[in-house]
């Protein structure tokens, strides 16, 4: 994406940041950034908005300022699409046993062994099957478990929908204590070309 730095862990867990440029298709059906406000209004997370068309997230701009997010959208995006460190028995899609990835700040976690992100990246190059869908659901629940532990949400619902042989959608419904549930849907065209070769 033109106009800004791009960070990519590769494959499914790519998050690209660009300022200006392409129109975002947000999670809401209106294409607007859900729950975001101008960052000039107070401290919050910088708002990221998922684009199903591009398969990545982008910083959002409102009123010529970086948008902020006081809801859960950015927290969910970062939890799902930051590469979590692979477990010792995980097989990386690259085939390289040293490709363990992980977030650099995990070494500073308050709780030893507490890891951030998801292992969805391990599914890169996988052919979409019911077994892959089960693993995707497991990885999504694992990535969002901190929200339950920290009492941010009372419950988490996850759905995995393989609508075609090369597209998987991840649905997440979060029930916040004493508030309305919020739902997100993330999709990406799946690259199983290497798996088929």
Image (cartoon, grey):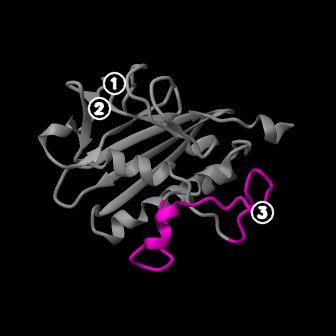
Label 2: how many residues lie within 10 Å, few (<14), some (14-19) or many (20+)?
many
Q: CA distance from mark 1 to mark 2?
A: 7 Å
What range is drawn magenta here? Answer: 88-116
The x and y percentages for residue 50 are 42, 35
Q: Earlier in the sequence, mark 3 or mark 1?
A: 1
The x and y percentages for residue 128 are 69, 42
Identify the residue position indicated by label 1 in the image: 31
> What is the residue that sits farthest to the right in this orientation?
197
Question: Does 132 sit left or right of 38 as displayed?
Answer: right
Question: Does 59 sit left or right of 3 as displayed?
Answer: left
Q: Element under label 1?
A: loop
At 62% across and 56% down in the image, what residue appears? 135
Identify the residue position indicated by label 2 in the image: 33
The x and y percentages for residue 79 are 44, 54
Q: CA distance from mark 3 to mark 2?
A: 39 Å
Identify the residue position indicated by label 3 in the image: 97
At 39% across and 20% down in the image, what residue appears? 23
Q: Nearer the viewer, mark 3 or mark 1?
A: 3
Marks 3/1 in contact by CB < 8 Å: the verdict is no
Q: CA distance from mark 3 to mark 1?
A: 40 Å
Q: Does residue 113 lie above or below 95 as drawn?
A: below
Numbered tag placed on residue 45 in the rendering: none
Q: Nearer the viewer, residue 79 or 139?
A: 79
Question: Does 97 sit left or right of 17 as displayed?
Answer: right
Q: Does residue 172 lie above or below 97 as drawn?
A: above
Q: Is residue 103 magenta?
A: yes
Q: Is residue 121 magenta?
A: no
Label 3: how many residues lie within 10 Å, few (<14), some (14-19) or many (20+)?
few
Q: Nearer the viewer, residue 30 or 4?
A: 4
Q: Element under label 2?
A: loop
Q: Nearer the viewer, residue 1 or 37?
A: 1
């Amino acid at each position: 994406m033109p106009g800004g730095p791009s960070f990519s862990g590769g494959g499914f867990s790519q998050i690209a940041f660009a300022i200006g440029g392409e129109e975002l298709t947000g999670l809401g059906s209106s294409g607007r950034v859900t729950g975001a406000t101008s960052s000039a209004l107070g401290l919050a997370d910088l708002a990221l908005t998922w684009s199903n068309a591009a398969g990545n997230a982008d910083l959002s701009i409102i009123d010529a300022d970086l948008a902020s997010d006081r809801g859960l959208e950015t927290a969910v995006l970062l939890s799902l699409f930051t590469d979590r460190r692979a477990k010792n028995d995980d097989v990386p899609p690259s085939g390289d046993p040293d490709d363990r990835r992980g977030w650099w700040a995990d070494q500073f976690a308050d709780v030893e062994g507490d890891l951030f992100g998801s292992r969805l990246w391990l599914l890169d190059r996988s052919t979409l099957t019911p077994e892959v869908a089960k693993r995707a659901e497991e990885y999504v629940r694992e990535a969002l478990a901190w929200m339950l532990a920290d009492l941010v949400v009372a419950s988490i619902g996850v759905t995995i929908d393989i609508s075609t042989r090369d597209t998987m959608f991840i649905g997440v419904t979060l029930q916040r204590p004493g508030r309305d549930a919020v739902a997100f849907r993330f999709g990406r065209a799946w690259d199983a070309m290497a798996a088929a070769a």
